[in-house]
Structure formats: C-alpha cells, structure tokens
C-alpha cells in the first residue's frame, strides 16, 4: 500500500507563545507526529557545552539535524522549537511563527518560573520579533506565517486554519 504524502510543519516563536499547546493538539487531531526539539535534545543529550550566562546546556544543532533527518524524510512531522535557522530549509512545507503580546507573555513566563535576565531577554526577543526575522531569513517568505497566540480564541482559530491547510496540502500532493 502506498502511504499518503503528509506535510512537515514548523511551529516556532519565543518561549511561552504556545507552540507546545498548539503542536500537541494538532498532532492529536491529525495523526501527525509532534516533535519537541528541546525535549529530544534533553532525552538524547544532544548538547555541546554549557552556557554559563544562561546556566543551560548549549544545543548541538548538527546532532539534532542528524537525529531528525530520517523522520523528516517520511513527512507528517510537527516540529516545535524556539529557533529555526539551523534546520535544513527543505524539511518544511510551512512555517508558523506564533506571536504573543508582551504583557500576556510576561505573565506566562513568570508563572513558568522565569525571572531576572532570562525573563527580560525572552520578552525582548518577542518585542524585537527576533524569531520572525530568523524565520523570514531562513525560509521562503511565502511559506512563513505569523499567528497571534494571546487567548483561547486565537488557539482555536490557529488550529482550524492549520487543519484546513493540511487538508488542502494532502489533496494537492496525493
Ligand atoms: P511554548 O511551547 O511556546 O513555550 P506553551 O505551549 O508551553 O508555549 O504555552 C505556554 C503557556 O501558555 C501554557 O501555560 C499554555 C498557555 N497558552 C498557550 N497558548 C495559549 C493561548 N492561545 N491562549 C491562552 N493560553 C495559552
């Protein structure tokens, strides 16, 4: 039996914007596979050194790419990470950059236990639209889409929009 072709989707954006929430729910509704790159790195210790300033291990980007290459070739992957410039451009059929208003993001990160410099830096990352610009530089502009992610209504709308996009992609590619 020939397998249906399925798209690979990248969910990116500043920590706390809602990538995991959206990604897991999408995977549940579609049968696509959710991949959290941060968790994967932790489980397989895909690190290369330690960042003293942020007191966290440094992601070994090459090993992450090696680890995921075969899966991405199969299609049907939903990848979640707060960065996007080290993935091969060819992996993704569409890129969503989730965006959250500063005050909302501040509260989410604070309740996650972020404080001080880590909290400030992440809020700045969102204010300067760092990840959006990274995505626009790393992928064809026409496949990069920003999605507001401030409240449950946004979440539901984003879900519906992506479900529709997946359905259309499947029709066009099978
Ligand atoms: P990320 O994976 O981008 O770090 P998350 O999915 O863990 O973000 O979400 C961070 C917190 O915000 C979590 O408590 C769930 C909540 N959240 C996510 N998306 C939301 C939305 N659209 N409306 C309200 N809360 C949301």
Image: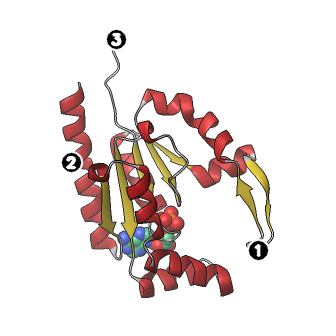
**Residue 113 in view, yes or no:** no
Q: Earlier in the sequence, mark 3 or mark 1?
A: 3
Measured Cα–Cα span from mark 3 to mark 2:
25 Å
Q: Give the percent coordinates (x, y) of residue 171.
A: 18, 32
Q: Earlier in the sequence, mark 2 or mark 1?
A: 1
- Outermost residue toward the top in this view: 1
Residue at (52% x, 31% y) in the render: 71
Q: Earlier in the sequence, mark 3 or mark 2?
A: 3
Camera-side residue of 34 and 96: 96
Mark 1 neighbour density, 10 Å: few (under 14) some (14–19) many (20 or more): few
Residue 169: image quadrant is top left
Q: Is 15 on the left-hand or right-hand side of 62?
A: left
- Which residue bears the numbered disc 2? 164
Q: Give the percent coordinates (x, y) of residue 144.
A: 32, 54
User: Image quadrant for the N terminus?
Assistant: top left
- Which residue bears the numbered disc 1? 53
Would you say the residues marked 3 and 1 are in contact, meaning their CB atoms lie under 8 Å apart?
no
């Amino acid at each position: 039996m020939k397998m249906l072709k399925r798209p690979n989707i990248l969910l990116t954006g500043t920590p706390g914007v809602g990538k995991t929430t959206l990604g897991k729910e999408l995977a549940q509704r579609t049968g696509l596979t959710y991949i959290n790159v941060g968790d994967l790195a932790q489980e397989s210790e895909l690190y290369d050194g330690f960042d003293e300033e942020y007191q966290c291990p440094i992601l070994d980007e090459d090993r992450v790419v090696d680890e995921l290459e075969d899966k991405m070739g199969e299609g049907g992957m939903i990848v979640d990470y707060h960065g996007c410039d080290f993935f091969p451009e060819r992996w993704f059929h569409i890129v969503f950059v989730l965006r959250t208003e500063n005050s909302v993001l501040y509260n989410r990160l604070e309740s996650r236990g972020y404080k001080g410099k880590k909290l400030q830096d992440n809020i700045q990352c969102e204010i300067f639209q760092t990840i959006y610009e990274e995505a626009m530089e790393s992928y064809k502009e026409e496949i990069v889409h920003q999605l507001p992610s401030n409240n449950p209504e946004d979440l539901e709308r984003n879900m519906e929009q992506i479900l529709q996009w997946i359905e259309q992609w499947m029709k066009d590619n099978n």
